[in-house]
Amino acid sequence: MDSAFFIGMIGFLKIGVDKDKQTMKRLLAAILVAVFLLSACSAVTGIEISNTWTRPALQDGNGAVYFLLQNHSAFGDELTGVSSEAAQAVEIHESRMEGDVMQMRQIPSLAIRGKESIEFGPGGYHVMLVGLKQELKAGDEIQITFISKIMRTCG
C-alpha cells in the first residue's frame, strides 16, 4: 500500500473518532495489521530476473538475452535451464577472454549463492537464442522460462 495513501486513510479515520472511539481504534488497529501483513507479502523471495534486454536480431539468426539474476533467498540455488517458444534452442552461455581471444561456450548450469546477484551482459554470461523463429525488433516481447534446481520455474 502506498504510504501517502495510508497516511490519508489514517487522517480520514481520525475525523470520525468522536462517534465511537473504541470501534475506530479497533478499525485502525486492523488496518495497521493488514498493512503490515501486505508489506510482508510484497517482499521478493527466491530467484528474481530483472532488467531484461536484447539487441535486435533477424529471424533464423541468433540473439542474446541479458538481465540481472538475483537470489533473494539465504539458500543457494542453481540455474539449470532456459526455454522459449521464440527460438529453436535456448542455452546458457558464458563469454570470457582466453589470452587475446574472446571465447563463448555453453554451460549446463550456473550456481547462485544465497543473497547473490549475477549480471548477465555482453562479454559475460547470457542466454543464447539459437535459430530465432521471429525477428526481434525494438519493443518486441518474448517469453523465456528459467528453470532452477530449487525454485523450479520462473518467467
Image (spheres, rainbow, N blue to C red):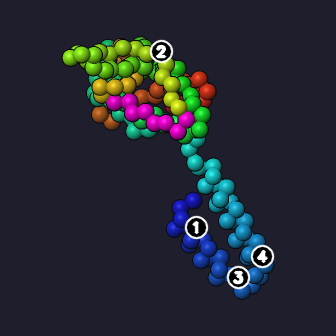
What kind of residue is marked 1?
Phe
Q: Residue at image x 53%, y 32%?
A: 113
* Label 1: how many Cα within 10 Å (few below 14, some 14–19, many 20+): some
Q: Secondary structure at mark 2?
A: loop
* Mark 2 and mark 3: Cα distance apart in space: 63 Å
For mark 3, what is the residue? 17
Spot occupied by residue 152 in the image (x, y as percentages of width and height): 60, 26
Question: Residue extending furthest front?
Answer: 99
Question: Residue extending furthest left?
Answer: 100
What kind of residue is marked 2?
Pro
Q: Secondary structure at mark 1?
A: helix
Spot occupied by residue 40 in the image (x, y as percentages of width and height): 63, 52
Question: Split into 4 quadrants, where in the image is the N terminus?
Answer: bottom right
Give whichever of discs 4 and 3 has the lower sequence position. 3
Q: Looking at the rendering, which quadrant does residue 141 occupy?
A: top left
**Residues at circles 2 and 3 in contact by the CB criterion of under 8 Å:** no
Magenta span: 114-121
* Label 3: how many Cα within 10 Å (few below 14, some 14–19, many 20+): few
For mark 4, what is the residue? 23
**Residues at circles 1 and 4 in contact by the CB criterion of under 8 Å:** no
